[in-house]
Structure formats: C-alpha cells, structure tokens
Amino acid sequence: MSPQELSRKKLLAIFQALIRLLEDHRMSDISVAVLCREAGVSRTYYYHHFQSYADIIYQENIMSVVQYMRQLPDQGIITTTTMFTRYFELAAKSRDTQLTLVKVGLESSLIHSFESAFEYLVKNDLVVKAHPSRIGKKYWTEFLAGAVVNMAVRWLQTGMGETPAQMGRFVSNFVGLTE
C-alpha cells in the first residue's frame, strides 16, 4: 500500500469512527483515546494530523470533494445540471454520514465542501457558466452552496423520492442555471 493509500485509509477510519461515535455521543464527550481505539489508529497519529475533531471532518470532506471531482465526466466543460446530479449521487451514497453531521449541527462542513468544489470547477472553467453575471458575484457561491446542501439534506431526510438526475434538474431550474 502506497503512503497516500495508507493515509487515505487512516483518515477514512478515523472519520468513520467519529461519525459512529457522534450517533450516540456529543462531540465534547468523545475522548481522543476512545476515538483512536474505535478507529484503530494511534493517538500519535491523531495529534500529528489533526488539531480538532472538526479538522477530521474538514479533511474527509476535502477528500470527498476530490472523489466528487474524479466522478465528473471527462469531457471538458460539464453542464451545471450534470454537476448538481453528481452532487446528489454523492449525497445519496453518504446519506447516513450527512444526516449524522446535520443531526449534530455540523451541516456547515457540507456547505463548505460544496463551496470548495464549485469554486474549483468555476475557476478552472470546468463547468458551463450559465448566467456568468451571477457567478463570481459577492456571496453567490455561499448562496448556491447553502441552497443545494439544504435541498440535499431535505431530500435525504424525506427518503430520496426523486432521482439524483431529477434533483440536478430541479436545482438548475430553481437557481436559473439551466444551459
């Protein structure tokens, strides 16, 4: 196993352990020793790589963004509908984790991850800029991330009655970013 694969495996293990523990405990009640034991990593690993539990969530969310980016079609510029569809597919795959983060008041980590992904796609001209006058305006990314994540959370909470593709189209239509 390469160092990158080992690092990813440990990050995923400690993140999943934290999520499992958060299902039954407040974050402030989870000790580093218990978290590390549950994850199968050393406390040295924790203190070397993280400053807080929020840092674990942030780092895993960034890795999820990278995974999300790799799932996008490799066809140059993608449509916003495709981008949103892929986001809802990712949300469906990580349903339990996302709902746990919401339950414990950490939905801002989901919003931050979406912001990072969207900003990357726009900056690198990887997404069609429908209504380019909106994109790049002050607070646009924050508005969009909050709207999309809120819709995704509600969709997850209500049993995902629509497909990710339908949700992708809804978002594009709601925010006026149809191609």
Image (cartoon, rainbow, N blue to C red):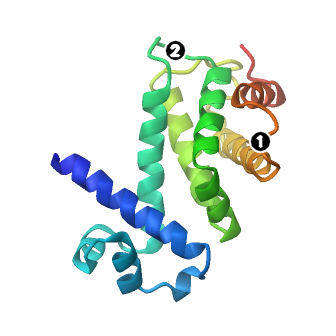
Q: Assess disc 1: are there few (<14), some (14-19) or many (≥20) residues with their C-alpha within 10 Å of its C-alpha.
A: some
Residue 43, image quadrant:
bottom left
Residue at 62% across, 35% down: 89
Q: Quadrant of the C terminus?
A: top right
For residue 9, above or below residue 35 = above
User: Neighbour class for label 2 at 10 Å: few (<14), some, many (≥20)?
Assistant: some
Rendered view: 58 above or below 43: above
Question: Where residue 161 sits: x, y (%)?
Answer: 82, 38
Q: Compute the Cα span from label 2 to label 1.
A: 28 Å
In this figure, which residue is indicated by the disc labeled 2? 77
Q: Is residue 134 left or right of residue 120?
A: right
Q: Secondary structure at mark 2?
A: loop
Q: Where does the image place residue 54, in percent across and percent down from the top left?
A: 48, 69
Q: Position of residue 60 (x, y in %)?
A: 43, 55
At label 2, which amino acid type do we have? Ile
The residue pinned by badge 1 equals 160
The secondary element bearing badge 1 is classed as loop
For residue 62, the mark is none
Q: Position of residue 81 (x, y in %)?
A: 68, 22
